[in-house]
Image: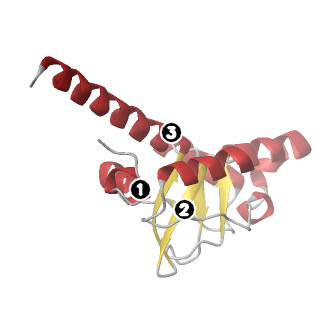
């Protein structure tokens, strides 16, 4: 069973192991239309904004685009990602506990967090990823308890 501090099943790394480490990024110079198309095509809720693909310059979420459209109308789609992105990005690392990351996301009202290691982008976790991991862990724990009760 999992659940204690430091156990591998409850860290960001366990999510990256399951989903992979590929991160799609965009340039701050891209238009919101281009970013929205990339999000739609890849079924992403957010893109890391990075000129190098290795560092995090910002993050652009679906909400950021919606806010810009609400403020500027359809013309917002021709604005630059840099105009809408969040520049002060909260990040995590592979060894951070899932519960801690989930609490930060809930408290600060965002759903995506880049994973940084040695100053470089190595992945992205979302609230959906966290919920999937927690549900899988609960299912595993319930199965183990059933087996224990049955004497297996």
- State how far apart marks 1 and 2 are (Cα): 14 Å
Residue drawn at x 77%, y 54% is 78
Of labels 1 and 3, the one closer to you = 1
Q: Which of the 4 quarters of the picture holds residue 73?
A: top right
- State how far apart marks 1 and 3 are (Cα): 15 Å
Work out which quarter of the rendered image holds the N terminus and state it: top left
Residue drawn at x 68%, y 49% is 33
Query: Residue 140, how many percent across, how many down?
Result: 28, 32
Of marks 2 and 3, which one's residue comes earlier in the chain? Answer: 2
Question: Residue at label 3?
Answer: 128
Q: Is residue 9 above or below residue 25?
A: above
Dot label at residue 11: 1
Query: Residue 92, how many percent across, how many down?
Result: 54, 64
Dot label at residue 36: none
Judged from the image, the secondary structure of the residue bearing numbered disc 1 is loop
Of marks 1 and 3, which one's residue comes earlier in the chain? Answer: 1
- Label 1 Cα crowd, 10 Å radius (few <14 / some 14-19 / many 20+): many
**Model colouring:** secondary structure
Question: Residue at label 2?
Answer: 114
- State how far apart marks 2 and 3 are (Cα): 14 Å
């Amino acid at each position: 069973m999992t659940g204690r501090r430091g156990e591998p099943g409850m860290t960001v790394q366990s999510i990256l192991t399951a989903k992979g480490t590929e991160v799609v990024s965009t340039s701050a110079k891209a238009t919101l239309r281009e970013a929205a198309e990339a999000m739609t095509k890849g079924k992403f809720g957010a893109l890391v904004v990075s000129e190098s693909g290795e560092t995090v310059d910002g993050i652009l979420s679906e909400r950021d685009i919606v806010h810009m459209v609400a403020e500027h109308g359809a013309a917002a789609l021709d604005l630059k990602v840099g105009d809408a992105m969040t520049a002060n990005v909260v990040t995590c690392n592979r060894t951070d506990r899932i519960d801690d990351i989930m609490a930060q996301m809930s408290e600060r009202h965002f759903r995506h967090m880049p994973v940084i290691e040695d100053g470089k982008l190595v992945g992205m976790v979302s609230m959906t990823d966290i919920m999937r991991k927690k549900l899988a862990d609960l299912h595993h724990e319930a199965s183990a308890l059933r087996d224990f009760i049955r004497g297996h």
